[in-house]
Image (spheres, grey):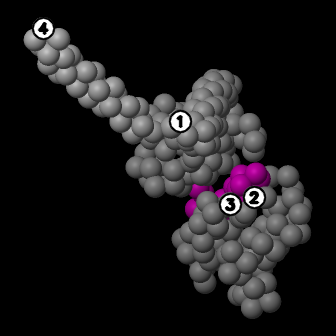
Amino acid sequence: MENIHKQRCLIPILLGLFLTVGIAGCKHQTLPANDPQSTQEMVQNDTKHKRMQSRIAWLLLEAEDAFKERRLTTPKTDNALSYYQEVLEQQPDNIEAQLGIERIVKRYKNMIRYAVEQKKLAKAQILLLRAQSVDKDHKLLQTLANEVMSLQSKGKLQFYLDVDLLQARSPIIVHHLASIRKYLTDGVQEVLLVSPTDADSQWILKQLDVNANEQRFTVQQQAGKQPKVQIKLSSSKNS
């Protein structure tokens, strides 16, 4: 009788152990095995992210140095704007780069205004073009463009071009030359083009939509380091 009682007591215990082991075994079987490919991808993504962050930090430091040294948009591959733009290519929402570009425009604004106060037309125009290469639609530059234009003399209009933007055939130069067309009216006596190369002169003429053989005014071309378009007005136009 005692043995029967012991056996009855052992049955629930054994059943419990069986269920515990069975459940544990099932759980063990349902656990996903480690995926070597997924782990490798995670490591690669993490490494890539760290490299990008390191690159961005370096670019921002270079941009700050360039800004302090007034390398705002030149030289071509070592200027504050190019560094900030590269940051935004990798991280479009980077606030520091966005604010940095805004600082460049404001720095140009101060330089342009000073040039206007000193009545230095060439410098003011070139600085304005460089500022427009950063953000041509910036509201600060609209007012400054009018101030720079006020420095022009009545009988002779001069439009100086930034040599780096010219040689790069920058869209800013294309837009600027297109805006000069409106001054090529019947009141023009002569147009003088100064440029480093003959190819530059021909390109400028094309942008101005000028055919030297079909115009009522004379077109002169001259070699020079500082490119410009000079428009001489007739005396009747001046009066």
Q: Which mark is residue 34?
A: 1
Local crowd size for mark 3, using a 10 Å CA cut-off: few (<14), some (14–19), many (≥20):
some
164 w.r.t. 56: above or below:
below
**Which residue is labeled 3 in the image?**
170
Q: Looking at numbered disc 4 in the image, what kind of residue is underneath it?
A: Glu
Viewer-proximal residue, 235 or 197?
197
- Front of the two marks 1 and 3: 1
Q: Looking at numbered disc 2 in the image, what kind of residue is underneath it?
A: Ala
Q: Which mark is residue 2?
A: 4
Q: Is residue 235 visible?
A: no
Q: Does 213 sit left or right of 177 as displayed? A: right
Query: Disc 1 or 3, which lies upstream in sequence?
Result: 1
Query: Disc 3 or 4, which lies upstream in sequence?
Result: 4
Q: Looking at numbered disc 1 in the image, what kind of residue is underneath it?
A: Asn
Membership of 153 in magenta stretch: yes
Specify the quadrant of the image occupied by residue 170: bottom right
Secondary structure beneath label 1: loop
Contact? badges 1 and 4 (CB < 8 Å): no
- Front of the two marks 2 and 4: 4
- Front of the two marks 2 and 1: 1
Q: Looking at numbered disc 3 in the image, what kind of residue is underneath it?
A: Ser
Secondary structure beneath label 4: helix
Secondary structure beneath label 3: loop
Membership of 179 in magenta stretch: no
Contact? badges 1 and 3 (CB < 8 Å): no
In the rendered image, residue 153, in percent from the top left (x then y), is placed at 60, 57
Query: Disc 2 or 1, which lies upstream in sequence?
Result: 1
Q: Which mark is residue 168?
A: 2
Q: Does 72 sit left or right of 218 as displayed? A: left
